[in-house]
Amino acid sequence: MKVVIGTQSKEKLKRFKELFKGIPIEFLLVSDLGINEGIEETGDSVNENAMLKAAYYAKKTGLPCMSLDSGLFFIDYPKEDPIQVLAHVKSPKGIALNPIQMKEYYQQLAHEYGGCLKASW
């Protein structure tokens, strides 16, 4: 059985293979199927974003799809604080960032908050 993982992350693929070790499933990344575009993560939670990705890639490929998403929570600040990105790690404040821009954004954010932010992924 083939199952698409709704990501281009090889690390997430590795996690799925480990979780389902011993079960006859061939996991594929979307890039294995020639799909290189992502979708806009408009969900209000990591669960909603994972469901959006899974539904999108299942429809696009015609194969069952699983997705896993994560978020970022800054521990010393309340959930409602504007610093929180939660499910929008790649698009803080509604602006989509590539990996280099993400690194720069979070470095600058840490600098603005005294050089160190405790966070949970």
Image (cartoon, helix red, strand yellow):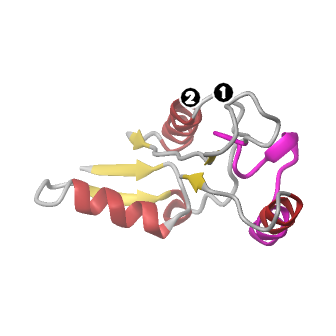
In the structure shown, which secondary structural element does the residue marked by tag 1 occupy?
loop
Is 75 placed left or right of 115 in the picture? left
> What distance separates the C-alpha of mark 2 from that of mark 1?
6 Å
- Residue 51, position in %: x, y? 51, 31
* Residue under the image location 85 percent in, 66 percent down: 111
Give amino acid for label 1: Asp
Q: Is residue 120 above or below residue 43?
A: below
Q: Which residue is tagged 2?
A: 48
Dot 1 surroundings within 10 Å: few (below 14), some, or many (20 or more)? Answer: few
Q: Please tell me which residue lies in front, 21 or 80.
A: 80
Are the residues flagged by discs 2 and 1 in contact, CB closer than 8 Å? yes
Is 41 placed left or right of 8 in the picture? right
* Residue under the image location 84 percent in, 69 percent down: 104
Q: Please tell me which residue lies in front, 43 or 35.
A: 43
Dot 2 surroundings within 10 Å: few (below 14), some, or many (20 or more)? Answer: some
- Residue 101, position in %: x, y? 84, 66
Magenta span covers which residues? Answer: 85-105
Is 98 placed left or right of 58 in the picture? right
In the structure shown, which secondary structural element does the residue marked by tag 2 occupy?
helix
Q: Please tell me which residue lies in front, 93 or 78.
A: 78
Viewer-nearest of discs 2 and 1: 1
Give amino acid for label 2: Glu
Q: Is residue 38 above or below residue 18?
A: above
Question: Residue 44: which numbered mark, if any?
Answer: 1
How many numbered discs, if any?
2
Residue 80 is inside the magenta segment: no
Q: Please tell me which residue lies in front, 120 or 101.
A: 120
